[in-house]
Image (cartoon, rainbow, N blue to C red):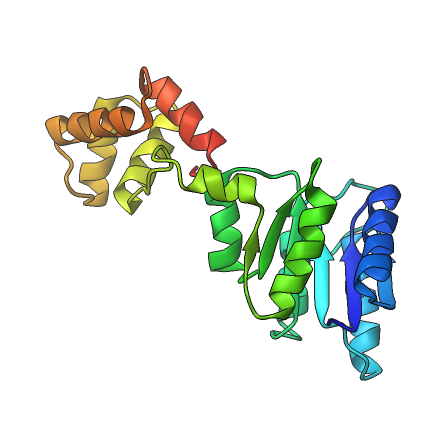
Amino acid sequence: MFKKVLIAEDLGSINHGISHILQDRMGIEKIQQAQYCDEAYLRFRKANNEKEPFDLLITDLSFKENHRERTFVDGVQLIEGIRSIQPEIKVIIYSMEDRPNKIKSFFSDQYINGYVCKGRYGLSELVQSVTEIYEDKTFISPRIVNMMNKNNVFELKDYDLLLLKHLSNGLTQEQIRDVFRKSHVSPNSASSIEKRLNKLKYNFKAKNAIHLVAMTKDLGLL
């Protein structure tokens, strides 16, 4: 089992809850807590310099602002900062974020090992995730897995993302056509853009373009 764990969570009650359950149910004795990303990073650097590194990081994504000047403002930056020094450290994100595609990006971009949703089953799932990740498996909360498996989570192409981005910025289809032509983005005819929008609206079951943009933002695609 993991020997030394670093917990980064701005709510003290959650921090202590995680620490308590890792000690009592999993027998992990060396646990350090931090309520700010910079504090977590300093604890990590100190342990590394003393040749007693952490082998697991559990972090939230969002942290409340305070009066201090911050180098790391969120969990993603903290993960990237720590991984730049110790690439092999295992990482679990423990957060309220529940957008499937956003969570997918943490695995593909930050190479995390586990994602646990806060909530009724959060702590029990966290115990399960620690066990599975120690065995070199990955873990995602079952609720998120179910959402990922739904047919309405549609993979977007770069062209689609660009099209939706311009729509979200208030451009009309005619204006997008002109932008695409100037930027040499293809296809760029009015009919091609309209057909692609209609296909996206069909796949997402959106009523109109505004509804489509809202849905893709909610899913973390934009």
Give the quadrant of residue 87: bottom right
The quarter of the picture where the N terminus appears is bottom right
**Image spot of residue 217 (x, y percent):** 46, 31
Say which of 4 and 131 sits in front.
Answer: 131
The percent position of residue 119, horizontal first and vertical second, equals: 70, 36
Asked if residue 175 shows in the view, the reply is no
Residue at 86%, 61% in the rendered image: 23
| Apparent side of residue 130 relative to residue 212 in the rendered image (left or right) | right
| Residue in the picture at 36% in, 32% down | 152
Q: How many marks?
A: 0
Question: Is 96 situated above or below 15?
Answer: above
Q: Quadrant of residue 215?
A: top left
Of all residues, the one furthest to the bottom in this rendering is: 51
In this view of the protein, can residue 97 be seen by the observer? yes
User: Can you give x and y, in whole percent of width and height, for residue 147 in the image?
Assistant: 46, 37
| Image quarter hosting the C terminus | top left
Q: Residue furthest front?
A: 25
Q: Residue 183, how many percent across, how many down?
A: 23, 43
Q: Is residue 16 left or right of residue 113?
A: right
Q: Residue furthest top?
A: 207
- On screen, residue 94 versus residue 192, left or right, reads right
- Front residue (pair 110, 126): 126
